[in-house]
Amino acid sequence: MVRVEQASKNIKYSTIAYIINNLLKFVVRLVFVKSLSIEYLGIHGLLSNLLAMLSLAELGVGPAIIYSLYQPLAKKDTETIKALIELFKKAYMAIGLVIISAGICLLPWLDWFIKGNTVADIYWFYLVFLLNTGISYFYSYKRNLLIADQKQYINSFYQSGGQIVLAVLQIVFLLIYPSYLVYIILMLLVTISENCAAAKKADRIYPYLQEKNVQFLSADIKSTILKNIKAMIAHKIGGMAVFSTANLILSKFVGLTAVGLYSNYYLVIAASNSFAGQFFASITASIGNLIALESNQKKADIFKVTEFIVAWQALVIGCGFCTLLNPLIELWLGKQFLFDEAIVTWLIINFYLTYMRMAVNAFKDASGLYWNDRYKPIAEAVINLAVSVYLTIHYGVIGVIWGGIISTLLTCFWVEPYVLFRNGIDIKLKDYFKDYFKYAAVTLLTAVFSKWLYNKLLSEVTIINFILGVILCLVISNAVWILLFRKREEMSYLRNVARDKFGMRFL
């Protein structure tokens, strides 16, 4: 029950932080596009992707060490925790220096990534981004202990606090002095301040981190960490190739304007993915604790509940995107920032495929199964890059989306659940896919019906109609899900949790 309480607390605080942060991000983006030209929006997306590529230097050290913290935290083995955090510190200091050094070496080739660059100060912008990424590693290692110890809500407090301060400062400066350089310098200063504050909080919660007598790690723990890091190198490459190259490919073969338009849609979709990210950041440590201590049957039962929640979320969000994504962009930024319906449809399909991987990946990571599918991300990266570049050259923006979908279907879609169910969770693969396709069919039919009904009733794009559309999608998607799956064991489990932990006695 302690595990459920910690997960519930983490989810509650993370959800509040998520809502505040993403509302402010949308306000910041609105002020941004009104204050600066669309080329700066493209530059922001491009530099974000470039620095994500440089973060490959992290090599999966973070996830590998976090996984190694689950058992010592569960057993309150402070000596091993201290040794792991000391290893974390040394590794992250080295990683930060490598990122900054590699980033400086990349400076002479920066123009190669941009088709028709007209922004003069891009090198200064890049250096600020580079420092923001590299320096963050010098201070952030202690916050991972909070996450591993089921205290994600504390991490969320500092993250959301930093993001709120950053958003307010960026809005004020964009209105008073619209400079992109100032905009990103503020980002650097807040990143440093936020990481320092979180590190000091970790020191107060875990005073033993200040002790100088740190023992050597056992050979078994070192061997496990090294093995997982080797596997995570492949995972980092795959993740970088799939999630951090779209803007680079668009910038190179289409132009910065396309990057700017794409980044607006990506911001909306990323907000939804970050909701899942917050949710799983809140419960992953609890999953790790579950895997370390509970029976195989308990693990399988909780996985099914988690997958059920993810599919439910994907239905609600996917239904909303299908109906309201273009109206949202139009109301938020204007018609000149819209993509064609075909591009939007493929974006939503790609979103659904990515979102539905969340439960499998959370359990796979918490089980430490990095080594077991180490070749998958390499195949995913090769397929994604080759297909995305080819299709983008021939078909434009839609090509980079097709590349992501094709690489996902050929690799992650079946490899990730296969690895998890063969090595970690006792569930048959065919039973998983049976549920998956059932959930997907319900999502597709509900989304099509919601869009049809919205267009029939509320075809004009206005704020009032958009709000009514949100209510319509929420009511239809949740009503369909509850009606169809009300008798499933997963729904009964969630109903009991809602009654016991959230006081919803009426359920």
Image (cartoon, rainbow, N blue to C red):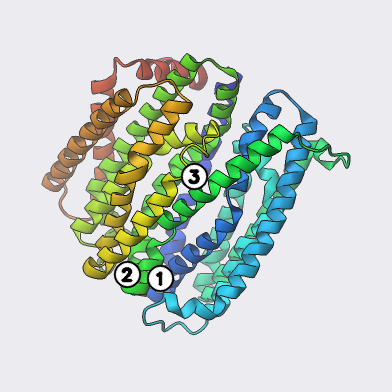
Describe residue 124's horizontal placement relative to residue 336 as left or right. right
Q: Are marks 1 and 2 in contact (CB under 8 Å)?
A: yes
Q: Percent x, y for residue 481? A: 27, 27
Query: What residue did someone put label 3 on?
Result: 18
Describe residue 50's horizontal placement relative to residue 98 as left or right. left
| Earlier residue among tags 2 and 3 | 3
| Earlier residue among tags 1 and 2 | 1
Q: Amino acid at mark 3?
A: Tyr
**Farthest left residue in view:** 456
Q: Amino acid at mark 1?
A: Gly
Describe residue 322's horizontal placement relative to residue 161 as left or right. left
Checking the image for residue 258, the label placed there is 2
Q: Percent x, y for residue 406? A: 28, 50
Could you say which quadrant of the image residue 410 lies in?
top left
- Can residue 74 be seen at all in this image of the molecule? yes
Query: What residue did someone put label 1 on?
Result: 42
Q: How many marks?
A: 3
Question: How far apart in space, not on screen, are marks 1 and 3 (Cα)?
Answer: 25 Å
* 312, 165: nearer the viewer: 312
